[in-house]
Image (spheres, rainbow, N blue to C red):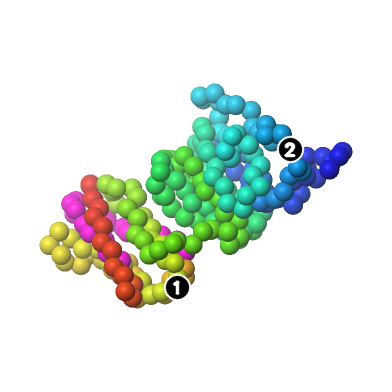
Amino acid sequence: AKGATASSLLAAFGRIELADASGSHSTLWLNGRLPENTPSMAYTVPPTSPGSGFAASFAGGRYVSESARAEVTLSGASFPVTITPSTAMTVEVLAGDQVASVLSAPAGATLEVADAQATRLRLSTGGAAELPAEFSLEQNYPNPFNPVTTIRFGLPEATGVTLEIFDMLGRRVAQLASSEPFAAGWHTVNFDARHHTSGQYFYRIRTEGHAITKRMVLLK
C-alpha cells in the first residue's frame, strides 16, 4: 500500500529471531503477502564477506519469504544458534544435503541448533511441513558416529513403529521403539552407543506391512 512502512507491511508475517553464540542477530519474516510488483531486490540483506559475522537469509539473500515453507542459509555462524519464532514452527536442520535433525516449537519458544555442520534450515510454519509421500528411513547422521547418532524416518500415516539395532552377527543390541504409536510425519530418534564397541551395525524399522534396514558405523 502506498505510504505503508516496512514494519506495517510485515505485520501479518511470522517473525523468526535467530542469534548465534557470538551474540549476532538476524530477523526473518515468513508466510505473508507483499504488495504486488514488489521489486525482487526488496527486503534483501547486505552481502557478507568471509569473517564478517553471522547472517541468515532466504533464497536470493532476502529476509522475507511469502511462502509458509522456506529454506534459510546460515553464514558465519558461531554455534549454537538459537531460533525463536513468533508462530508455531518446524525446523529441519540440514548439514550438506542431509537432514541432521528436526525441531518443533510452539510460538515464542526457543530452539537451539548445536550442530556446527549445519549450513541450512528448512522452516515450516504451523502445520505446513510436508508429509512423507511414502514410508521411508534415511541414513543416520552423523555416520560414522561416536557415540550418538540420529535416525530419521517418515510416515505417511499414523502407525506403530519398532526400531531396533543389530550387530554384524544379527544379534539385537538395542531397541529404540517397540510398536510405539507415531503420528504421520517426520520423526527422529537418537541412538547412544557409548556402551558398544566400534564396528558396523544395522538399524531396522518395522511397521505393519513395511520394513527397512540400513547400515551404520560406530567409530571410537
Image vertical order of residue 121 relative to residue 153, above or below:
above
* Quarter where residue 37 is shown: top right
9 or 166: nearer the eye? 9
**Residue 76 in sight in this render:** yes
**Mark 2 vs mark 1: in front:** 2
Residue 212 image point, x, y percent: 28, 63
Sequence-wise, which precedes: disc 2 or disc 1? Answer: 2
Q: Is residue 81 left or right of residue 193?
A: right
Image vertical order of residue 126 relative to residue 46, above or below:
below
Q: Residue at x 51, y 25 (%)?
A: 51
**Quadrant that contains the N terminus:** top right
**Which amino acid type is shown beneath numbered disc 1?**
Ala
Residue 156 image point, x, y percent: 44, 67
Q: Main secondary structure of the magenta part?
A: strand
Q: Is residue 218 magenta?
A: no
**Residue 89 in sight in this render:** no
Q: Which residue is mark 1?
A: 158
Q: Which residue is mark 2?
A: 38
**Which amino acid type is shown beneath numbered disc 2?**
Thr
37 or 180: nearer the eye? 37
* Mark 1 secondary-structure assignment: loop
Q: CA distance from mark 2 to mark 1?
A: 42 Å
Residue 217 image point, x, y percent: 23, 50
Tell me where the magenta segment starts and ends, as one range: 185-205
* Quarter where residue 204 is shown: bottom left
Label 2, residues with CA under 10 Å away: few <14, some 14-19, many ≥20: few
